[in-house]
Image: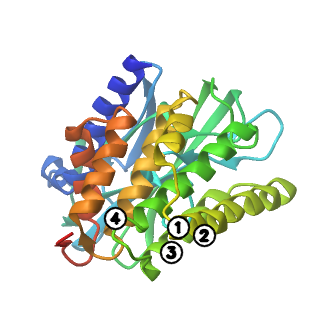
């Protein structure tokens, strides 16, 4: 398991760096009007990294702020394509866990492009969850969009892959229990400073809604009952200070699914920053959780910094 954690830490660190510096990618573009029409291609690097790149003339006729927005679906056997999810919220859409990658190109003048292939999306297959396990086709859609939301161009690339982990329509009851534990940990974090703020409650509720989003009919109803039941129970237990965080963390670790550990830590950090204040007690609690999930301090700080960068107002330091 140690090697998997090291791999995830290394790759996630690189991803966060790539995300935070993606606006610098415009430096690779050139004012070359003779280029061929814009095109994209998909590669799977070392059987583990989805790598998408573009080449050619960008189609904007005036200076515009451009971005590539990439989504992924998978087609399993004769079923209709279904969304691919992301375990890591860096790659999630705003309202669901569906995979979405946004790469800002910045302000791009006309007659600009790339005469060599330029990467605009890299994601480890390890971070993705399809609806089913096994051989299937990934369908990757990349749209070039301007600041007004107008789609200047759209591309579809496909690739056959073999997914070894269970799909989200095949998850066992163990995974459901882990997500219930994650909710309890989030509630425990919210109560660390002695108050349960509305922003924290809303954030946890939105996390549950995003988790429920891809499931269908009966499975969704059952899961909804389980997760909201866990939320209600955790809120009552936290008021009396009886949530056993160590037990919850042990159960998460016992799944041997390190990505669920990251899913837990990301939600907990979101809860910590929801009220706009980082208290010493919350920081100590999160450091303890990260340590017990085998996530080192450097990686924890990377995740925190990436999340804090999304806040509309600076994070204030609390006293307790």
Quadrant containing the N terminus is top left
Kindly tell me whether residue 114 is visible in this rendering. Answer: no
Could you tell me if the residues under marks 2 and 3 are in contact, i.e. CB atoms within 8 Å? no
Q: Which residue is mark 2?
A: 236
Tell me the residue that label 4 is attached to. 272
Callout 1: SS: loop
- Looking at the image, residue 234 lies above or below residue 159: below
Identify which residue is drawn at 46% across, 35% down: 42
Residue 124 seen in render: yes
Q: Are marks 1 and 2 in contact (CB under 8 Å)?
A: yes
**Residue at image coords 38%, 79%:** 148
Q: Residue 240: which numbered mark, if any?
A: 1
Q: What residue sits right under mark 3 in the picture?
A: 201
How far from the left and from the top, in percent, is residue 150? 44, 74
Q: Secondary structure at mark 3?
A: helix
Structural crowding at the residue carrying mark 2, measured as other residues with C-alpha within 10 Å and reported as few (<14), some (14–19) or many (≥20): few
Relative image position of residue 310 (x, y in whole percent): 29, 66
Give the foreground label among 1 and 3: 1
- The answer to which of marks 4 and 3 sits earlier in the sequence is 3
Q: Earlier in the sequence, mark 1 or mark 4?
A: 1
């Amino acid at each position: 398991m140690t090697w998997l954690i090291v791999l995830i830490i290394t790759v996630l660190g690189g991803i966060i760096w790539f995300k935070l510096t993606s606006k610098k990618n415009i430096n690779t573009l050139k004012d070359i009007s003779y280029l061929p029409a814009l095109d994209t291609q998909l590669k799977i690097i070392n059987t583990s990294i989805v790598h998408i790149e573009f080449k050619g003339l960008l189609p904007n006729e005036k200076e515009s702020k451009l971005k590539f927005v990439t989504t992924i679906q998978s087609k399993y056997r004769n079923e209709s394509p279904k969304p691919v999810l992301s375990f890591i919220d860096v790659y999630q859409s705003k309202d669901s866990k569906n995979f979405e990658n946004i790469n800002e190109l910045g302000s791009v003048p006309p007659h600009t492009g790339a005469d060599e292939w330029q990467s605009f999306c890299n994601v480890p297959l390890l971070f993705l969850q399809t609806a089913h396990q096994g051989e299937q086709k990934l369908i990757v859609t990349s749209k070039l969009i301007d600041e007004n939301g107008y789609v200047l161009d759209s591309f579809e690339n496909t690739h056959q892959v073999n997914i070894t982990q269970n799909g989200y329509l095949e998850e066992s009851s163990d995974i459901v229990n882990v997500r219930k534990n994650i909710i309890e940990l989030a509630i425990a974090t919210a109560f660390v400073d002695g108050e349960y703020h509305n922003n924290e409650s809303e954030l946890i509720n939105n996390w549950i809604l995003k988790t429920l989003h891809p499931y269908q009919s009966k499975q969704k109803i059952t899961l909804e009952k389980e997760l909201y039941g866990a939320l209600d129970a955790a809120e009552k237990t936290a008021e009396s200070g009886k949530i056993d965080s160590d037990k919850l963390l042990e159960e998460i670790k016992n799944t041997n699914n390190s990505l669920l550990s990251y899913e837990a830590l990301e939600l907990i950090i979101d809860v910590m920053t929801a009220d706009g204040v980082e208290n010493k007690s919350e920081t100590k609690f999160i450091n303890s959780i990260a340590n017990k999930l085998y996530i080192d301090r450097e990686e924890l700080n990377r995740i925190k910094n990436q999340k804090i960068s999304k806040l509309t107002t600076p994070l204030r330091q609390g006293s307790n």
